[in-house]
Image (cartoon, rainbow, N blue to C red):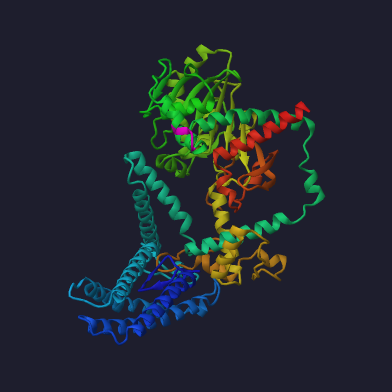
Amino acid sequence: MPGLVVFGRRWAIGSDDFVLPGAFELFVRLVWWIGILVLYTVHKGQFNCPGGGLLHSYLLGLLILLASIICALSALVYVSMQGTISNPGPRKSLPKILYTRLLLYLPEFIWAVVGAVWVSDNSVQCEKTVINGIIGTVIASWIIIVFTIIGVLIVFDPLGGKKTFYLPDGASRNLESSQSGQLLYNVKSSATRVWEKRIRLLCCCIVQDDDHRVAFTSIAELFRSYFSDTDLVPSDIAAGLILLHQEQDKMENCPKEPEEVLCHSPSSLVADDLDVELENAAHYMLFAAAAYGWPYYVYTNPYTALCKLNGDCCRNRAADSDITGSDRYNFHFGSILKITGLQYRDFIHISFHNKIYEIPFFVALDHKKEAVVVAVRGTLSFEDILTDLSADCEDLTLEEVLENGFVHKGITQAANYIYRKLINDGILNQAFTIAPEYKLVIVGHSLGGGTASILAIMLRNSFPTLRCYAFSPPGGLLSKSLADYTKHFIISVILGKDLVARLSMPNMEDLKRRIVRIVANCNRPKYQILLRGCWYEVFGGDPDDFPTELDGRNQDALTQPLLAEESLMVHRSPSYNALEEESHLNSPPQYPHLYLPGRIIHIVEESSSRRLCSSDIKYAARWSNETVFSSILISPKMITDHMPDVVLKALNSLSQEHGSCLSC
């Protein structure tokens, strides 16, 4: 629903967000009130001690104060439970109750100070139980006050104090064009500055130069444009994701049509090709995982990694390995050696240098596959995250490539950096001087997979036999023409419901619209959605069949947005401006469609069996196409399916299964 408006400004909280925190505080206050009442009743005639008179008045006042707070909280929780996310009408009296509850913090603060003074008075000689009870009361009061202040800071919207402009349809046409343009520019500039400050705060621990400042502004513009046309609070988004997950699970449980099953049956030739590529992918995924260095090695070997690395940290590096960047204790290089099983002499160049648009990579000789392998590291630092989020599009201009197109800006700059190092510094020349008959293979996971793909496009003309294996690359990477061009030499490997492989601005816009639609049309209160959703995510079971306003509508009506959707997409609270004349639900996409690179191997979980301390998962793989990844899937595994160790485990499982079939 639209953000709550109190004290003349918008807050990042809805009027239906007080049910769960209010109920928890109500429970604490009730227990507290009962405890103080018992304490007062038991010691009613024992206040003759020094300081007892003040104690008697303090306890009586505390009982009255707690009773008032309990009444205010009860009313707050009850009113917050009314209505639905898109129907805040039954909760219109909540701001007045909230003002009353906040007003009660003043006497509570005074009483907490009085209690602290009384407890610290050495002249008080009352019973120990009473003193301990007052100490507990004072501590509880201060804890609640501190958490309330933290909560206020969390839900504070920096743009909430901006002047409100609620313009009816056609009103913008009555404004002077220069006036409306300046007004819209000011609102957008303010929102961009707020996002830029947030990003700078998150990245305060890294050295910031001109590249960082340009990236901060670009990313801030991206976030501002994405969040500017909705008025949802974070809990609305959480409820929407829960509803989408359950709706998605209901659709997956529906039996498939026979034609749909038959269309996935591969020919023997395609199946043989798939088996070969899966075996290659399982082999090269080791190199992509090794590029992460010691964090990956320690993560996958938590009990033995440090002991094994300590034995190698004091060894001298091989003189024929060109290493740049910081690896003071040889932990990164030692981990790469452990993971790949290569020798020191097999490495041509290793770079641990990491800045925005400049990511670590290494070049090594793979004698098993007779290949010069360039392995690019994925996201592991704030600089890498900034590279990921620099998601503007730019043209990729290449000689002798007929179909040029759009590419991800940040990842392209990272690929340009590695390209200059490989060519201008003569790294590839050195490698092929040692092994001239070897082929070139470029690999990477996540950000590394995207960078490896664009790097492969850049090197394709110089190395026609080049191959690239991109594991879990970002979805918004290449335009359709470039994606089709790469099908001859790039293999993308995607596991399950991997979020990153489906991340693109059009997909994010689609997710936003799906959230708005399902949240606006659900007829259940938000607290019920959140509670049942948490139960479903933790304990499983059948998805809830939440009634919606979509039920009973004919097919033609389903294509039209409902009134509640329009209000969530167009209605602007005090932090937003309503100058647009049309609903964003029907507006054309403002971001070009970008796709995954190359041919796509999609690995899915076929079956799983849970045991006491482990789980046995059976995977299946098939060739897929980019349209399968045109929508973000909501699942608890959308993050874990992206992790390099999980991808490697799935590939090894498929490779071993294929090997056992051949032996049979």
Residue at the farthest right position:
258
Residue occupying image coordinates x 47% and y 76%: 77
Question: Count of labels shown?
Answer: 0
How far from the left and from the top, in percent, is residue 409? 47, 39
How far from the left and from the top, in percent, is residue 479? 57, 40
Decide whether the magenta segment is chiefly helix, strand or loop.
loop
Q: Nearer the viewer, residue 12 or 314?
A: 314
In this picture, is 604 found above or below 562?
above
Residue 304 shows in the view: yes
Residue occupying image coordinates x 66% and y 37%: 601
Q: Quadrant of the C terminus?
A: top right
Residue 99 appears left or right of 606: left
Q: Which residues are magenta?
A: 302-306
Residue 341 appears left or right of 221: right
Q: Nearer the viewer, residue 594 or 518?
A: 518
How far from the left and from the top, in percent, is residue 199? 38, 50
Query: Residue 527 is drawn in which quadrant?
Result: bottom right
In this picture, is 265 found above or below 542?
above
How far from the left and from the top, in percent, is residue 125? 22, 76
Q: Nearer the viewer, residue 638 or 485?
A: 638
Residue at the farthest bottom position:
45
Residue 360 shows in the view: no
Residue 615 appears left or right of 160: right
Residue occupying image coordinates x 49% and y 23%: 363
Q: Nearer the viewer, residue 400 or 7?
A: 7
Residue 547 lies in the magenta stretch: no
Residue occupying image coordinates x 53% and y 77%: 82
